[in-house]
Image (cartoon, helix red, strand yellow):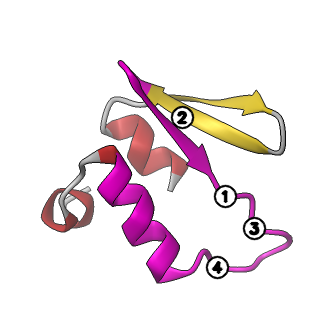
Amino acid sequence: MIRKLISLGFSGPVSGGKHQFMIKGEKKLRIPNPHGNKDIAICLIKEILRQAEISHTEWDSI
């Protein structure tokens, strides 16, 4: 997830309290920290994409 966000122009991750953040201009995305090897839930990925204004097509093309 972090690699894809970097390729879309986000910088980070940056530490910030309980969660890390990715930054692009005025946008600041909170990044989940799955414990161990757990996958991030699809609904959470969709919410992060919505906040970042990234389309599903754009995400899948990376």
Instruction: Provide the residue designation for mark 4.
Output: 39
Segment colored magenta: 24-51
- Please name which of the two marks, 4 or 2, marks the residue nearer to the observer: 2
Please identify the quarter of the rendering in which residue 19 is found.
top right
Seen at 61% across and 50% down, the residue is: 31
Alpha carbon of mark 1 to alpha carbon of mark 4: how far? 10 Å
Tell which circle, 4 or 2, labels the residue nearer the N-terminal end.
2
Alpha carbon of mark 3 to alpha carbon of mark 4: how far? 7 Å
Q: Which percent across, then down, holds residue 21?
A: 62, 36
Seen at 38% across and 21% down, the residue is: 26
Seen at 75% across and 67% down, the residue is: 34
Q: Is residue 48 magenta?
A: yes
Tell me if label 3 and label 1 are in contact, CB under 8 Å.
Answer: yes
Tell which circle, 2 or 1, labels the residue nearer the N-terminal end.
2
Count neighbours of disc 1 (C-alpha within 10 A) and say few if under 14, some if 14 to 19, many if 20 or more: some
Q: Which percent across, then down, holds residue 25?
A: 35, 18
Instruction: Provide the residue designation for mark 3.
Output: 34
User: In the image, 52: left or right of 37?
Assistant: left
Count neighbours of disc 3 (C-alpha within 10 A) and say few if under 14, some if 14 to 19, many if 20 or more: few
Tell which circle, 3 or 4, labels the residue nearer the N-terminal end.
3
Alpha carbon of mark 3 to alpha carbon of mark 2: how far? 16 Å
- Please name which of the two marks, 1 or 4, marks the residue nearer to the observer: 1
Q: Secondary structure at mark 1?
A: loop
Seen at 41% across and 65% down, the residue is: 47
Instruction: Provide the residue designation for mark 2.
Output: 22
Residue 15 vs 50, above or below: the answer is: above
Tell me if label 3 and label 4 are in contact, CB under 8 Å.
Answer: yes
Q: Secondary structure at mark 2?
A: strand
Amino acid under disc 1: Pro
Amino acid under disc 2: Met
Instruction: Provide the residue designation for mark 1.
Output: 32
Alpha carbon of mark 4 to alpha carbon of mark 2: how far? 19 Å
